[in-house]
Image (spheres, grey):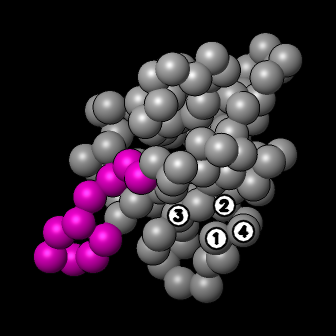
Amino acid sequence: MIAQYGYRDGSGTYYISIDTDLCDGCAGLEKPKCIEACPTGVFEVGEDEIDPFRDEPVAKVKEDHRNRIRFSCAPCKPASGWEIEKLPCVSSCPRKAINHSW
């Protein structure tokens, strides 16, 4: 499943997508890679909101960042010329489960 966190407004569509089939919450690591890589603390790891019967935790966007993703992620996205693959959260994910929609 693809979990999408974010919003759409008059200026665009701003989502972070996490493939919950790929994400394992960085099982076995003390601190998940996406949490470690994100300078603004957008991510947390916890119960899968899409599949509450799933046993292993998954990465997700913290509730207080979901309606301001555009601004929370701005420090990692220069005004022009950025590439999704080079964003810290995307490049740090060992299972390639994180993506940005804009």
Determine whether 65 is above or below 79 in the image: above
The amino acid type of the residue labelled 2 equals Leu
> In percent of the image, x 45 and y 73: which residue is there?
102
- First-in-chain label (3 vs 2): 2
Left or right relative to 87: residue 79 = left
Give the farthest residue toward the left.
10
- Residue located at (43% from left, 36% from top): 50
Q: CA distance from mark 3 to mark 4?
A: 9 Å
Examine the structure image and report whether residue 83 is included in the region drawn in magenta: no
Q: Looking at the image, which residue sits at the far bottom?
A: 81
Using the image, tell me which numbered label, if any, was put on residue 85.
4
**Badge 1 vs badge 3, beta-carbon distance below 8 Å:** yes
Give the residue number, with chain letter if any, for mark 3.
100
For badge 4, the amino acid type reads Glu
Residues shaded magenta: 4-13
Q: Residue 13's x, y, as percent? A: 31, 71
Is 62 positioned to the left or the right of 35 in the image?
left
* Image coords of residue 46 (percent x, y): 53, 20
The image position of residue 24, as x and y in percent, is 72, 32
Relative to residue 3, is residue 7 depicted above or below? below
